[in-house]
Amino acid sequence: MVKLKHIAKACKSKNAGPFHITLDIMFDKPALFEQVRDTGVISAALIAQLYGVDEADILFTEYAPALAWKATLPRRIASGAVGDTDVYGAQQHAPLLDIEIPLDIAA
């Protein structure tokens, strides 16, 4: 098992608007992307579970040419609203980057 944060990068898009967050999960090696894809761990169901939203509300796209997945999901609090949590980007990545992928890879 290896944590996703040891084999991938994640970024949060600021272009998703005040009501959505877009997270990208990116790899730098095609073989690694394919191995992770073959596990089936990264999915809309996983994102829904990690971020507490309904799976039906997630736009989840695999983009193999970029060795990436993109997930767009509702923000819990609209950006710019009182109590906006979106300013803490690292907190949004933590649930995702801490998942374990069943691969036998040295981190």
Image (cartoon, helix red, strand yellow):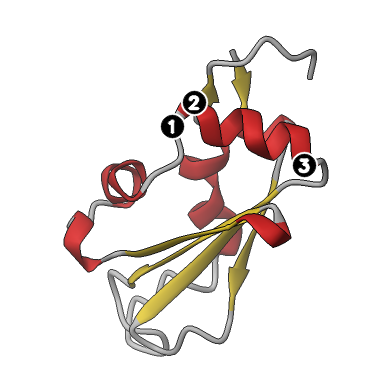
Is 13 drawn above or below residue 9 in the view shown?
A: below
> x, y percentage for residue 52?
24, 51
Q: What amino acid type is highlighted by mark number 1?
A: Val
> x, y percentage for residue 101?
54, 23
Taking depth in this image into account, of 19 and 38 the one nearest to the observer is 38
Mark 3–mark 1 distance (CA, rounded to whole Å) = 17 Å
Mark 1–mark 2 distance (CA, rounded to whole Å) = 5 Å
Mark 3 packing: few (<14 Cα in 10 Å), some, or many (20+)?
Answer: few
Residue at label 2? Answer: 39
Q: Is residue 98 visible?
A: no
Q: Is residue 11 visible?
A: yes
Residue at label 3? Answer: 30
Q: Which mark is in front, 1 or 2?
A: 2
Q: What amino acid type is highlighted by mark number 3?
A: Pro
Taking depth in this image into account, of 48 and 95 the one nearest to the observer is 48
Give SS at disc 3.
helix
Q: Which mark is in front, 3 or 1?
A: 3
> x, y percentage for residue 88?
55, 65
Q: What amino acid type is highlighted by mark number 2?
A: Thr
Drawn side of residue 11 relative to residue 16, left or right: right
Residue at label 1? Answer: 41
The residue lying at 63 percent from left, 28 percent from top is 35
> x, y percentage for residue 26?
68, 52
Mark 2–mark 3 distance (CA, rounded to whole Å) = 15 Å
